[in-house]
Amino acid sequence: MKNIYMTGGDGQDGIILTSIFSKKKNFKLFLLKKNFKKGSIYSSINLRTIYSKKIDKYLKKNKPHILIHLAAKNPSYREYSKKKFYNDNLSFSVKLFKKVYEVNPCVKIIFTNSSQVFSKREGVVNEKSKTRVSSDYTKFRLETVKYLIKKKINFMNVILFNHDSIFRNKKFLLPRLIKAIKLKRIKFIQKIIDLNISADFSHAEDICNGIYKLAITSRKIQDIILSSNKRTSVNNIIKYILNKNSLELKLNFKSRKKNPNSLIGSNKKAKKLLNWRPKKNIYIAANEIYKKIKI
């Protein structure tokens, strides 16, 4: 029986991964959450205990074998200055890593990173592509990786591209857009159409299955990308939702803007080392979101 500790259990990826691990008999799941509550399929630990001695006894009693670090405070919240966002996220991550490492120096840490860390803003990138600090968000991500390397901790740097599901926070683009379609907010939808956005989108279940495969693999992998390996137009997603649900909205798809040549993540390494393949796609996720929205 392996003990898995996971932050970000309340978020999209945490919810999906909790469902995946709860169906496996050889894992015991411990969620570090803001909202402390007992769960039938997992044990819940208040995040604040990381800064107290209570967590030391708990970790010794329930030795961590794997830590999946999904959580990060959102930089868009008004109460967080850029400096405070960076300091809070980095200090929490370092404190967490120290705690689990002291109890088990062989612990496997899976750190979920963002495609925003890449220097390139268009074309195809892989695990060897250059990175750069472009914001406090990317600074936190890259400094965390540097810390893990410096301390020689066994970790996986998992770089995630855009992924959505019915569990995605409503503030993100796709849930907002799909709700607008449901409510027939033509002006907002047309504004998005005119931007002609495209990106590397995946179904969140595919991405989380990739994280699960990383948790169970015995391979030594430091950097790995999980992505769809292709560019998808948001306008095509809109058209798909309209056609799939027999909706007729007066929209103009003849955009004057050129389709931005957005970033694509190569998932060749994940396919080769993990035998991982996306089974769904962003169109399925978008329609699932549409079906779930109640008005």
Image: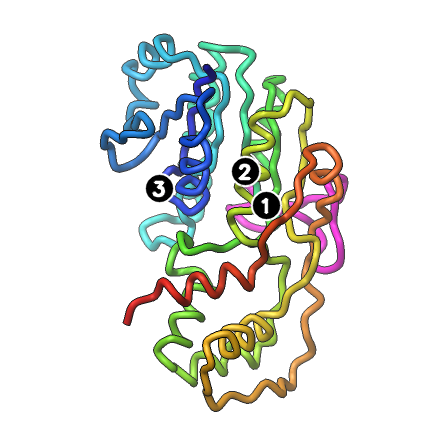
Q: Position of residue 152 (x, y in %)?
A: 63, 17
Foreground mark, 2 or 3, reads: 3
Question: Going from the N terminus, do you reach mark 1 or mark 3 first?
Answer: 3
Segment colored magenta: 117-141
Viewer-side residue, 19 vs 110 = 19
Q: Position of residue 213 (x, y in %)?
A: 59, 32
Are there few (<14), some (14-19), or many (20+) residues within 10 Å of tag 1? many
Question: Does the magenta portion include 257?
Answer: no
* Kind of residue indicated by mark 1: Leu
Q: Residue 269 has which mark? A: none
**Magenta span main SS:** loop
Marks 2 and 3 sit apart, C-alpha to C-alpha, by 15 Å
Q: Position of residue 162 (x, y in %)?
A: 56, 54
- Residue at disc 1, secondary structure: strand
Viewer-side residue, 12 vs 116 = 12
* Kind of residue indicated by mark 3: Asp
- Residue at disc 3, secondary structure: loop
Q: Which residue is mark 3?
A: 10
